[in-house]
Image: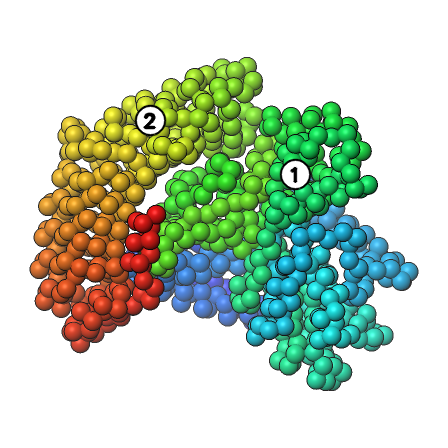
């Protein structure tokens, strides 16, 4: 009877959700991509819910889980209906709402997975599941045998320290300080696999000062990836609290019993619980083990970040001196460097990238080997063989973090794509967005992109670098951020991408030293390759001597260059599927880019990004690409090329919706013909310090929604026609130091929601017309400018004035001084 009631309730709320999604797809343009994906998922599940499928098996779950999911779907309907109420200028709210839609889609697939798998599971998949189940049973048997034999496997005692510990003493001091003095109950030590997190946690437990604080109440539990709250509590009861038998029916019972026992037995004594190697799936376990007991602390080690718990200690890699010491300990256990030249040792240590695990494993593998073996190993690595080919242990340790992305296959692909960029270089988040929007059909607003960046960051697979202190959530996640990746993680991405025949790889990453084209390229120049992402990196000695390469399926082409002059390869014109072209110079001076007319035949090309290039001689070729949607010039030498472009403005970039010009220091004027780009929605001209005027016809960009002009320090005024931009919702003129007034027509920006203007120190008054900005909600400014707006607060009822506290003008002057 209960099952029938649950089935009826589930069908009812599911049907209402289907109707809500269908309704919002038709009536709102917001979140359309996400809603379509959600609709597709619902349509896939629909036969299971209403047909004669396996809904009974889906409902064969605990009663409370089914009821919670039904309640979740009821709220999900409201979530979908809210799509039309989220204001388009509230980018952060859009981001949060989009994440909720993504999670809804994932939860639907997870809940109905049982029935769907019964309908669609292949024989091979069933076989894998049976093997996995057999493995679990073997693990259980081995664990039981070990435990009965008095082995260490099931124990919660603090493990012993390794014989050699190098480079962790200062980390120990800082971790102790934070553990003993921070108010946060949970402290997480986070780093990629193989960095020494577990060793550091053991050092903490064996430290005399820690022992003096916590006494015998130091509990150490290694948390497996499949651990449950019940299993962790059972370990604590049996092996630490000396309870002979403990069987819990539910996690809630285990939690309550542990809390009661700790409070009753420990009394006023301090308690330290160490949870070692916690995976992201177990984040709720940490929360469940938090109890309001004075003096109770939890130390977590994880390769993931858990920002919800507040305090995180990110363990850095070894410095050069410590790395060499650790390496030599394993390579030369007798203490003397024998039969190997010192420079070979230095090169080998450098190849290990400061990772303790790689230094230990590679050092041990070379122990006792003659110099020929050392030279051969280094030569293989210099010729492109991966360090992971020499160490299965190292590969398995780091690959575990990537394998954990199996439920998020696109996130795994995004990690692998990071190998397309050079070692030790920052990667613009917006460049990644350009790639992923086209490769994985993500939304152009960047919601999915930011989701995957956050996911990779939380797993320590990349790091964020914001370039502006006030990079506001109001602007969207990707606009002002770069990411970096440790060299060994980049090498892992390349290694995993390089499996299988070259002609069949989904991404092909090529590094050319001098003019040495890889042998396989020369030998197979007439054979097509099936790669979707092609990355070619060349050094300053490369002379643009290309062999033919047939790559008709390439959708993203990344060129990383250093030479002073660089010629695009002729084979680019045969990439009929190319959607994204990214050319970046990493040399000291901008590289001269030649043969740009080759791109004229690429009818599918939608996004082009040029960084640190001199392209003044052939810029007109760029403006002839008919289907281009986004065009970016970053740190490019443009000179007066924009002004001398002679093509008909009416046929110029007819589909362009976003134009980005950043740090183009020789740009003095924006030509009038750019005002004919009538489909343009986003215009960003930033950090162009020579720009002193905008075109008078700027107001012709009738579809413009976002206008960024920050740090154009010589820009003296905004054109009067700006008042015609009635669809403009976001305007950034921060650090435009020379603007001393706003035009009277400024008040005609009736759609404006967000205005950033911190650092406009020359502005002495606002035009009276600002009282017409009735939709304006957020003004981000410095304290001086806030006084100008305070006069109009009563006229603008919804206005919120956000004062930027830090002195960005002083920061700018420091940059100029440098």
Question: Residue sitting at 49 percent across and 21 percent down?
Answer: 514
Horizontal placement of 323 versus 812: left or right? right
Q: Quadrant of residue 372?
A: top right
Report the front residue among 247 and 702.
Answer: 702
State the image coordinates of residue 469 (x, y, percent, origin top left). Answer: 37, 58
Visible residue check, residue 811: yes
State the image coordinates of residue 217 (x, y, percent, origin top left). Answer: 75, 74
Mark 2 sits on what residue? Answer: 593
Question: Residue sitting at 45 percent across and 65 percent down?
Answer: 76
Report the front residue among 138 and 53.
Answer: 138
Query: Badge 1 local density, few (<14 within 10 Å), some, or many (20+)?
Result: many
As drawn, 488 above or below 811: above
Report the front residue among 493 and 790.
Answer: 790
Report the front residue among 349 and 94.
Answer: 349
Mark 1 sits on what residue? Answer: 349
Q: Secondary structure at mark 1?
A: helix
Q: Colour mode?
A: rainbow
As drawn, 695 above or below 706: above
């Amino acid at each position: 009877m209960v099952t029938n009631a649950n089935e009826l309730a589930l069908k009812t709320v599911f049907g209402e959700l289907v109707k809500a999604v269908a309704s919002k797809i038709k009536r709102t343009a917001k979140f359309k991509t996400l809603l379509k994906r959600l609709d597709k998922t619902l349509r896939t599940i629909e036969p299971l819910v209403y047909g004669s499928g396996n809904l009974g098996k889906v409902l064969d779950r605990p009663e409370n889980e089914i009821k919670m999911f039904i309640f979740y779907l009821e709220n999900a309907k409201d979530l979908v209906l809210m799509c039309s109420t989220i204001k388009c200028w509230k980018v952060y709210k859009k981001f949060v709402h989009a994440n909720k839609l993504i999670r809804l889609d994932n939860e639907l697939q997870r809940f109905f997975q049982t029935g769907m798998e019964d309908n669609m599971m292949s024989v091979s998949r069933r076989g894998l599941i049976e093997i996995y189940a057999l493995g679990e049973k073997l693990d259980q048997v081995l664990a039981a045998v070990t435990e009965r034999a008095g082995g260490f496997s099931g124990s919660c005692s603090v493990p012993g320290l390794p014989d050699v510990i190098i480079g962790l003493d200062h980390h120990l001091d800082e971790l102790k300080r934070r553990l003993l003095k921070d108010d946060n109950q949970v402290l997480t030590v986070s780093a990629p696999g193989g960095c020494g997190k577990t060793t550091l946690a053991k050092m903490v437990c064996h430290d005399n000062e820690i022992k003096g604080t916590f006494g015998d109440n130091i509990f150490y539990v290694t948390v497996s990836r499949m651990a449950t709250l019940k299993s962790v509590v059972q370990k604590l009861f049996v092996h630490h609290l000396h309870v002979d038998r403990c069987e819990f029916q539910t996690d809630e019972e285990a939690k309550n019993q542990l809390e009661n026992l700790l409070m009753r037995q420990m009394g006023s004594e301090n308690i330290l619980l160490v949870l070692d190697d916690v995976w992201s799936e177990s984040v709720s376990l940490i929360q469940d083990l938090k109890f309001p007991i004075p003096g109770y602390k939890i130390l977590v080690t994880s390769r993931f970040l858990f920002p919800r718990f507040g305090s995180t200690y990110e363990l850095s890699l070894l410095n050069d001196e410590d790395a060499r010491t650790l390496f030599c300990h394993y390579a030369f256990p007798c203490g003397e460097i024998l039969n190997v030249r010192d420079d070979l040792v230095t090169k080998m240590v450098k190849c290990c990238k400061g990772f303790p695990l790689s230094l230990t494993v590679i050092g041990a593998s070379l122990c006792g080997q003659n110099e020929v073996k050392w030279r051969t190993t280094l030569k293989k690595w210099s010729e492109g063989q991966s360090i992971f080919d020499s160490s299965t242990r190292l590969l398995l340790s780091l690959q575990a973090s990537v394998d954990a992305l199996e439920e998020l296959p696109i996130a795994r692909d995004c990690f692998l794509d990071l190998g397309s960029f050079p070692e030790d270089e920052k990667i613009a988040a917006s460049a990644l967005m350009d790639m992923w929007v086209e490769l994985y059909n993500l939304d152009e607003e960047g919601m999915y992109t930011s989701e995957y960046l956050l996911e990779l960051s939380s797993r320590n697979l990349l790091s964020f670098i914001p370039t502006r202190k006030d990079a506001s959530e109001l602007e969207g996640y990707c606009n002002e951020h770069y990411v970096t990746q440790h060299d060994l993680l980049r090498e892992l991405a390349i290694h995993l991408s390089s499996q299988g025949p070259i002609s069949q790889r989904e991404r092909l990453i090529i590094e050319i030293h001098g003019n040495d084209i890889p042998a396989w390229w020369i030998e197979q120049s007439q054979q097509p390759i099936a790669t979707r992402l092609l990355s070619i990196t060349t050094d300053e000695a490369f002379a643009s001597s290309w062999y033919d390469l047939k790559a008709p399926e390439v959708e993203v082409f990344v060129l990383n260059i250093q030479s002073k002059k660089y010629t695009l390869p002729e084979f680019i014109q045969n990439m009929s599927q190319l959607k994204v072209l990214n050319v970046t110079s990493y040399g000291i001076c901008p590289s001269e880019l030649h043969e740009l007319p080759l791109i004229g035949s690429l009818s599918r090309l939608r996004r082009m990004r040029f960084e640190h290039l001199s392209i003044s001689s052939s810029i007109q070729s760029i403006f002839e690409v008919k289907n281009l949607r986004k065009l970016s010039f970053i740190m490019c030498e443009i000179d007066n090329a924009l002004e001398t472009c002679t093509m008909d403005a009416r046929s110029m970039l007819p589909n362009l919706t976003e134009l980005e010009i950043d740090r183009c220091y020789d740009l003095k004027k924006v030509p009038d013909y750019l005002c004919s780009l009538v489909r343009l929605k986003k215009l960003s001209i930033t950090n162009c310090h020579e720009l002193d005027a905008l075109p008078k016809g700027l107001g012709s960009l009738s579809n413009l929604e976002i206008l960024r002009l920050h740090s154009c320090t010589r820009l003296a005024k905004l054109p009067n026609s700006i008042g015609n931009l009635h669809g403009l919702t976001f305007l950034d003129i921060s650090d435009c130091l020379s603007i001393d007034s706003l035009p009277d027509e400024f008040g005609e920006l009736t759609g404006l929601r967000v205005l950033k203007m911190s650092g406009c120190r020359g502005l002495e008054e606002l035009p009276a017309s600002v009282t017409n900005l009735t939709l304006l909600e957020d003004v981000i400014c410095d304290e001086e400018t806030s006084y100008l707006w305070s006069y109009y607060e009563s006229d603008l009822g919804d206005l919120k004035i956000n004062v930027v506290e830090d002195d960005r003008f002083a920061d700018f002057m420091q940059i100029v001084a440098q």
